[in-house]
Image (cartoon, rainbow, N blue to C red):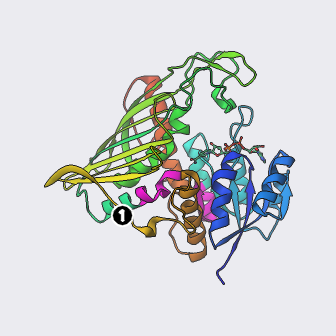
């Protein structure tokens, strides 16, 4: 009998149903014992669907339960409660629970570092919804790089993009994408919402942190239709590009957008080095959700790489949708890290803080039209 961690989930919406809860059901190391949502009917429906015994609408009551080991924050911050991940993650850690949190933990990277330090001070582990580092093809790419396949890392190119919001007529349900008032200053949107996982991968693959960035945010679709049919000015970053330089001398270009034609999820990671190159695509095309290709100086034509079985999560069935496939790995990995003890804790709040600092730095670069060096504040310990 394996040790089973007792989990409380906050947020019973779409992503909880398609990614988080199916992940917890599959790992032998967890049992979801409670679910909480402001919408009681939704919480009850999910409880029934996933066989969860207890339902709450009040987070405080959930956090007060001493028998819960792990809190999963899977809410969506609305425009009047923009920082709700941050608030709930701090509350979970204060209550002594390990914490899985959807991205971003906080919009300001400094607060993500604070949450990380709080977790460390209490001996708690954290994990962030950096979904795509748990895609089997990306995990294998990381291991190949670690084993030396590309040699010294030179260049990383990353994309996270699809055409989810290309049409201005498509009612946008993510309310924070539509500022109610005309906004003269572009609001960071795609760079944070879409960019975070590819920024995470860029550092993971190049095995270094970023020391300087220059970037641009762009609004391509200026007006959008709300769910109640109004046209509103939507001055958000729906496309962005930055270039960066790493501490180890490598360089990168990273692009994110939700108005560029292509399918979900829409990631491409290219790593080039002195001995070889690897290209991983997570773009669902003709039923195939992930591909990995390799080339070497002696064989420069890229060829497909088969992904070994060990990179697939428990209960994998061929053709399963990417959200549950990738998230099952994420959840299983987090539960293993907690059960095994020790220092292993990949994709944690510290990594999220590094990602968020790059997002914050690219925003500064765009607004001030200049290169921005990192760390942004040398007094903040990494
Ligand atoms: N990592 C990824 O790849 C990925 C993909 C999709 C969504 N997400 C993230 O997952 C999160 C949830 O997205 P979604 O599509 O499920 O949103 P959703 O709107 O469908 O569901 C969010 C739920 O959170 C609940 N909620 C909000 N504040 C709450 C609070 N204080 N207490 C209790 N419940 C609260 C809402 O009532 C709602 O039911 C978002 O942060 C989103 O950005 C991540």
Viewed as shown, does residue 189 lie left or right of 230? left
Q: Nearer the viewer, residue 160 or 299?
A: 299
Residue at the limit of the structure toward the bottom, as seen here: 1
Q: Secondary structure at mark 1?
A: helix
Q: Position of residue 362 (x, y in %)?
A: 45, 33
| Residue at x 19%, y 53% (from the top left corner) | 274
Viewed as shown, does residue 315 lie left or right of 376? right
Residue 53 sits above or below residue 248 on the image: below
Q: Quadrant of residue 314?
A: bottom right
| Residue at x 82%, y 52% (from the top left corner) | 45
Q: Position of residue 24 (x, y in %)?
A: 66, 63
Q: Which residue bears the numbered disc 1?
A: 143
Residue 26 sits above or below residue 236 on the image: below
In this view of the protein, can residue 129 be seen by the observer? no
In this view of the protein, can residue 84 be seen by the observer? yes
Viewed as shown, does residue 127 lie left or right of 285? right
Q: Position of residue 121 (x, y in %)?
A: 62, 64
Q: Position of residue 109 (x, y in %)?
A: 55, 44
Q: Is residue 137 inside the magenta stretch?
A: yes
| Residue at x 53%, y 66% (from the top left corner) | 313
Report the number of numbered marks. Answer: 1
Give the magenta part as a residue range. 116-139
Question: Where ligand 1 lies, by image quadrant?
Answer: top right
């Amino acid at each position: 009998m394996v040790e089973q961690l007792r989990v409380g989930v906050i947020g019973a919406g779409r992503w909880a149903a398609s990614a988080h809860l199916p992940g917890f059901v599959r790992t032998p190391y967890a049992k979801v014992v409670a679910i909480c949502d402001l919408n009681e009917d939704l919480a009850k429906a999910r409880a029934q669907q996933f066989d969860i015994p207890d339902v709450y609408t009040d987070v405080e009551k959930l956090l007060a339960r001493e028998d819960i080991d792990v809190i999963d924050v899977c809410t969506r911050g609305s425009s009047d409660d923009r920082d709700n991940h941050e608030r709930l993650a701090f509350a979970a850690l204060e209550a002594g629970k390990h914490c899985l949190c959807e991205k971003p933990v906080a919009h300001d990277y400094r607060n993500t570092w604070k949450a990380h330090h709080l977790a460390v001070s209490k001996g708690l582990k954290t994990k962030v919804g950096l979904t795509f580092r748990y895609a089997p093809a990306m995990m294998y790419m990381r291991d190949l790089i670690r084993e030396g396949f590309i040699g010294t890392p030179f260049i990383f190119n990353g994309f996270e993009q699809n055409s989810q919001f290309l049409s201005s007529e498509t009612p946008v349900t993510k309310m924070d994408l539509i500022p109610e008032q005309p906004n003269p200053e572009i609001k960071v949107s795609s760079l944070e919402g879409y960019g975070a996982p590819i920024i995470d991968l860029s550092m993971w693959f190049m095995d270094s942190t970023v020391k300087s960035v220059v970037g641009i945010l762009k609004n391509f679709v200026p007006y959008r239709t709300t769910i109640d049919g109004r046209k509103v000015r939507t001055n958000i970053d729906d496309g962005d590009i930055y270039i960066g330089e790493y501490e180890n001398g490598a360089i990168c270009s990273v692009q994110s957008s939700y108005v560029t034609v292509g399918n979900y999820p829409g990631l491409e990671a290219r790593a080039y080095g002195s001995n070889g190159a690897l290209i991983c695509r997570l773009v669902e095309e003709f039923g195939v959700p992930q591909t990995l290709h390799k080339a070497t100086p002696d064989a420069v034509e890229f060829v497909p790489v088969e992904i070994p079985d060990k990179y697939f999560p428990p209960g994998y069935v061929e053709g399963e949708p990417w959200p549950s496939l990738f998230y099952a790995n994420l959840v299983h990995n987090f539960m293993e890290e907690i059960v095994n003890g020790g220092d292993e804790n990949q994709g944690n709040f510290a990594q999220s803080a590094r990602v968020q600092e790059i997002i914050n730095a690219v925003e500064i670069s765009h607004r001030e039209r200049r290169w921005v060096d990192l760390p942004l504040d040398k007094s903040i310990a990494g």
